Image (cartoon, coloured by chain):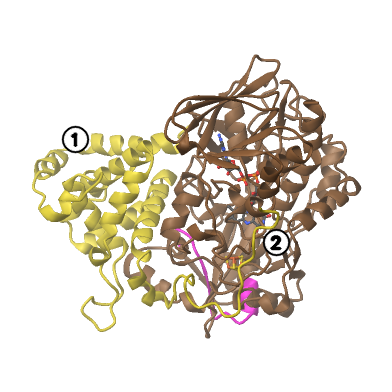
């Protein structure tokens, strides 16, 4: 049952075995698994419950509803827009449905360098497979590759670079192209659609429009959470276990503002975000990049997961609707409008850095996440590499010119022009950057001095506190994270269930 | 550390201090009272003060200026026709209080103080369009990363106000939402596992 906090008429006390904070990829999976294990579980979600009928395919109405801070969340230095979801289903409601397992090399790195136990590729392979079945993951069919993605495919073929078709979790997709504004046709196999109905059928409760303010504890063991509805009613939930699934920003901020013991000052550290910049190629003919499945092809030529590799950029397509595009295109006024007139003929690629920079999440006194992230030169070099590669792909695909949005905008017309995209050009504040994959602020590992939770997701110092979301990752993934978030949450939920036997 | 929360108000305070310290600043404040506002529009405001509506109108006119004369055939709508300022008013009214306070402080700073730092002796809303563009370009290209950030945030808000309106989509050739259009042979899927 989904109960909106708006319907509570008085302060309330509830009691459950487990309370899960947040209902995104990690929270919904943990809730479903705990319900399957027969536990009494409540998932508390600060955002509302929005269903396909609510999704009107308009940016101005959907961004404020579906995204944290109405789509305006940024790093504290205002250099990077950080997009994250808010509402039942979390970021899985508006994400673009790409499904990729964590690369074996990354899981090996977690095992060998970060002391993670039980998450080797062979340990997780069966769990990945179960999650992929849950979400109906399949390869995006050839006839669903739109013209924007075809430009990427053609460019890669012309250059002889590595790349290929992506997999997704859609069934009955209308190819409308509005994925980032919620699917009006209910084709996304997201957490709200696939996991929560089963969890609720097994007795779980979802309390929406209610924000968890504090984790209640005595310094040694949790006793529940204190939450507040959007209408101001306080809800005290007594529980033997608390699962943090409020995302890599929300979980760390909540732990910090709750005074969770942190003797080695680890909570909030190690934030990775896959910062990404964009390039837009202008073609002679219409591309109409907003039509069809937004992302279906990838370039992995500049991505090598070996330790110390200097190839750390993942390139895919990134077409935006009018408001997103208008914000990205450089300048303002008449010049800006002239560039907007190229909209139909543009193909847009994004280069996301598999980042080594470690950002940090802290909390405001009210518990709002503050995201500090100062991109290091080695990652800026990767960003420059990615923007150059993106522009080269578009030229190879037949673009007449490639616009590289920046404070000093650059138009690339041939390979020689690419040299202008150097380390200095690829500065935050100079190039507009967006991040959609925050990870790693409550890292898992067996070393208490370098991690926040153990390999079972259990907090090192506070009994009864668990983490099941993207904040578990000890490093960046270098690709879309949702499948790995779902998988870790499924893998670790049994330890939560065991703890409340 | 500078946070987004305190940045805009700090910038505004710094700008206002700069303005009040100079004679020109005093002159600008003296003129701050002479705003002419349409009472019908002012009556509908949710969070902007009437004088702020004039500033936001002026910013909208520059951020969203067209590349062709508005009286030419097929010209896009003006920001005024689209109601960009009314959108900004509504958006800020629904934002959390700190964001609202900071944006309003930024508008005040852009109107009263920042033009002077670019060598203009009048407040923003009284400058010529060319001088207003000069002020915005200077903000965008500022050596201060935070002022650049303020420009970007402000621009996004105005672009949202303009390009949200279907009448502007002709500029792009964008055909808009598909919901409600005929969908041949498609049957909605039920929630799997739902009862
Ligand atoms: C635009 C966009 C596109 C993306 N596309 C893809 C893609 O194609 N493929 C992919 O793999 N990944 C994609 N992602 C990322 C992916 O969706 C996330 O990595 C994943 O959902 C993270 O899961 P999570 O459980 O950590 O957090 P989330 O899914 O973000 O869920 C966290 C939830 O916690 C809630 N919450 C936060 N604080 C509190 C609190 N104090 N009290 C109560 N509730 C709280 C939030 O409202 C939110 O609903 C995309 C993300 C974005 C933004
Ligand atoms: S492209 Fe498919 S999944 Fe995306 S919004 Fe349209 S129908 Fe839904």
Q: Work out whether disc 1 and disc 2 sit on a shared chain.
A: no
Looking at this view, is A309 or A11 the one in front?
A11
Expressed as whole percent of the image width and height from the top left, the position of residue A32 reads 72, 43
Magenta range is A392-408
* Residue at the right extreme of this rendering: A122
Other-residue count near label 2 (Cα within 10 Å), few / some / many at <14 / 14–19 / ≥20: many
Badge 2 element: loop
Q: Is residue B17 found left or right of B121 in the rendered image?
A: right
Letter of the chain shown yellow in the rendering: B
Expressed as whole percent of the image width and height from the top left, the position of residue B193 reads 70, 54
Q: Which residue is mark 2?
A: A169
Residue A393 belongs to magenta span: yes
Q: Residue at x 70, y 61 (%)?
A: A169
Q: Quadrant of residue A23?
A: top right
Other-residue count near label 1 (Cα within 10 Å), few / some / many at <14 / 14–19 / ≥20: some
Q: Residue at x 84, y 34 (%)?
A: A115
The tag on residue B168 is none
Q: Is residue A141 above or below residue A372?
A: below
Q: Is residue A79 above or below residue A415?
A: above
Expressed as whole percent of the image width and height from the top left, the position of residue B86 reads 26, 55
Q: Is residue A281 above or below residue A39?
A: below
CA separation in Å, label 1 and label 2: 59 Å
Colour in which the image shows chain A: brown
Looking at this view, is A3 or B132 the one in front?
A3
Q: Is residue A172 found left or right of B75 in the rendered image?
A: right
Q: Which residue is mark 1?
A: B20
């Amino acid at each position: 049952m989904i109960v909106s906090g708006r319907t509570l008429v008085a302060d309330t006390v509830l009691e459950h075995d487990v309370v899960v904070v947040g209902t995104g990829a990690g929270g919904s999976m943990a809730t479903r698994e705990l319900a399957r294990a027969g536990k009494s579980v409540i998932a508390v979600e600060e955002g509302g419950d929005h269903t396909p009928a609510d999704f009107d395919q308009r940016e101005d109405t959907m961004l404020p509803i579906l995204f944290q801070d109405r789509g305006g969340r940024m790093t504290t230095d205002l250099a990077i827009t950080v997009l994250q979801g808010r509402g039942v289903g979390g970021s899985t409601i508006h994400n673009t449905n790409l499904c990729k397992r964590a690369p074996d090399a990354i899981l090996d790195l977690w095992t060998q360098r970060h002391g993670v136990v039980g998450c080797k590729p062979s340990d997780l392979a069966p769990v990945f497979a179960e999650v992929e079945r849950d979400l109906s993951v399949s390869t995006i069919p050839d006839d669903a590759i739109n013209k924007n993605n075809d430009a990427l495919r053609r460019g890669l073929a012309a250059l002889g670079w590595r790349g290929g078709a992506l997999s997704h979790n859609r069934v009955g997709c209308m190819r409308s192209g509005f994925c980032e504004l919620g699917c009006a046709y209910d084709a996304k196999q997201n957490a709200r659609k696939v996991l929560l109905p089963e969890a609720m059928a097994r007795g779980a409760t979802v309390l929406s429009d209610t924000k968890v303010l504090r984790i209640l504890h005595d310094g040694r063991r949790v006793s529940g959470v204190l939450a507040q509805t959007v209408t101001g009613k306080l809800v005290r939930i007594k529980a033997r276990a608390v699962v943090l699934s409020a995302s890599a920003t929300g979980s760390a901020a909540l732990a910090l503002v709750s005074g969770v013991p942190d003797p080695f000052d680890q909570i909030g550290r190690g934030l990775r975000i896959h910062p990404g910049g964009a390039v837009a190629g202008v073609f002679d003919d219409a591309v109409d990049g907003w039509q069809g499945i937004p992302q279906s092809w990838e370039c992995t030529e500049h991505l090598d997961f070996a330790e110390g590799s200097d190839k750390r950029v993942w390139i895919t397509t990134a077409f935006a609707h009018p408001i997103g595009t208008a914000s990205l295109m450089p300048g303002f006024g008449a010049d800006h409008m002239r560039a907007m007139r190229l909209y139909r003929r543009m193909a847009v690629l994004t280069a996301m850095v598999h980042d080594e920079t470690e950002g940090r999440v802290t909390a405001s006194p009210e518990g709002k996440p503050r995201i500090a992230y100062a991109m290091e030169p080695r990652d800026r070099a990767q960003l420059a590499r990615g923007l150059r590669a993106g522009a080269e792909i578009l030229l190879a695909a037949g673009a007449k010119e490639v616009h590289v949005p920046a404070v000093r905008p650059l138009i690339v017309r041939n390979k020689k022009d690419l040299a202008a995209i150097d380390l200095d050009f690829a500065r935050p504040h100079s190039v507009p950057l967006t991040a959609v994959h925050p990870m790693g602020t409550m890292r898992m590992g067996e070393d208490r001095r370098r991690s926040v939770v153990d390999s079972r997701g259990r907090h090192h110092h506070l009994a009864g506190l668990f983490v099941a979301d993207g904040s578990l990752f000890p490093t960046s993934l270098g690709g879309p994270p949702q499948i790995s978030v779902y998988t870790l949450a499924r893998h670790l939920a049994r330890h939560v269930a065991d703890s409340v036997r | 550390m500078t946070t987004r929360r305190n940045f805009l108000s700090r910038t505004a305070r710094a700008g206002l201090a700069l303005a009040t310290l100079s004679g020109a600043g005093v002159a600008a404040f003296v003129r701050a009272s002479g705003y002419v506002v349409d009472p019908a529009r002012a009556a509908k405001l949710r969070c902007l003060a009437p004088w702020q509506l004039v500033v936001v109108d002026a910013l909208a006119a520059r951020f969203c200026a067209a590349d062709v004369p508005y009286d030419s055939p097929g010209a896009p709508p003006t920001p005024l026709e689209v109601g960009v300022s009314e959108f900004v008013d509504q958006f800020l009214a629904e934002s959390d209080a700190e964001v609202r306070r900071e944006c309003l402080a930024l508008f005040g700073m852009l109107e009263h103080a920042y033009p002077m730092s670019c060598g203009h002796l009048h407040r923003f809303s009284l400058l010529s369009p060319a001088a207003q563009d000069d002020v915005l370009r200077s903000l965008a290209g500022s050596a201060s990363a935070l002022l650049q950030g303020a420009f970007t945030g402000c621009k996004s808000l105005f672009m949202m106000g303009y390009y949200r309106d279907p009448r502007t989509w002709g500029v792009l050739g964008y055909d808009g939402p598909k919901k409600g259009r005929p969908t041949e042979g498609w049957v909605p899927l039920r929630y799997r596992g739902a009862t």
